[in-house]
């Protein structure tokens, strides 16, 4: 089975977003002093690294080529994180807000693909996307709890 160009493009968009998230988490982790939040961000770095490999494997399995890097939009988001943390008096809260914003955007993208009735996903792809989406929901909830704790 070979995926349609639409499905392949959507999966590669997710892969690019995954690269962006991993880079964003690395940047955030560098700017945080709180050990428990630093560990949370480290866990998310590893999670997104794993997500990337899983997505690459899934894309390749269906005869397509995976993307190799992040996006300009992700670069801009990280630049914004750098700028706001350099002028903000409460870096941790601001960084966690940006983490939440990124996670919400990721969730929207996963939900869009999973709910698109015009795309017929292989069971392995659907299962992978549901698993990753659910992990992102958990990360979003954890980021909210950390933000509440520091605000």
Image (cartoon, grey):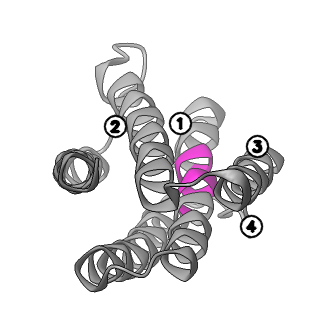
User: Which residue is rendered at x = 56% and y = 54% of the image?
Assistant: 89
Q: Position of residue 121 (x, y in %)?
A: 34, 37
Quote the CA–CA distance across marks 3 and 2: 27 Å
Whether residue 148 can be seen here: yes
Disc 3 element: helix
* Image position of 68 (left or right of 31): right
Looking at the rendering, the stretch of residues picked out in magenta corresponds to 12-18
Quote the CA–CA distance across marks 2 and 1: 8 Å
Quote the CA–CA distance across marks 3 and 4: 12 Å
The stretch drawn in magenta includes residue 26: no
| Disc 4 target residue | 69
Quote the CA–CA distance across marks 2 and 4: 24 Å
Q: Main secondary structure of the magenta part?
A: helix
| Disc 1 target residue | 7
User: Which residue is rendered at x = 65% and y = 64% of the image?
Assistant: 66
Q: Which mark is residue 121?
A: 2
| Disc 3 target residue | 73
- Kindly indicate whether the residue at mark 2 contacts the one at mark 3 (C-beta within 8 angstroms): no
- Kindly indicate whether the residue at mark 1 contacts the one at mark 2 (C-beta within 8 angstroms): yes
């Amino acid at each position: 089975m070979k995926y349609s160009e639409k499905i392949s493009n959507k999966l590669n968009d997710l892969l690019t977003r995954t690269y962006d998230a991993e880079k964003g988490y690395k940047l955030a982790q560098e700017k945080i002093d709180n050990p428990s939040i630093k560990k949370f961000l480290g866990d998310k770095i590893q999670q997104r690294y794993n997500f990337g490999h899983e997505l690459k494997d899934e894309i390749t399995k269906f005869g397509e080529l995976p993307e190799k890097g992040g996006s300009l939009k992700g670069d801009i988001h990280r630049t914004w994180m750098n700028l706001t943390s350099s002028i903000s008096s409460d870096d941790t809260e601001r960084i966690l807000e940006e983490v939440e914003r990124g996670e919400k955007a990721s969730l929207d993208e996963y939900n869009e693909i999973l709910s698109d009735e015009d795309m017929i996903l292989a069971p392995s792809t659907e299962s992978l996307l549901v698993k990753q989406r659910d992990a992102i929901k958990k990360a979003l909830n954890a980021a909210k709890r950390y933000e509440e704790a520091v605000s």
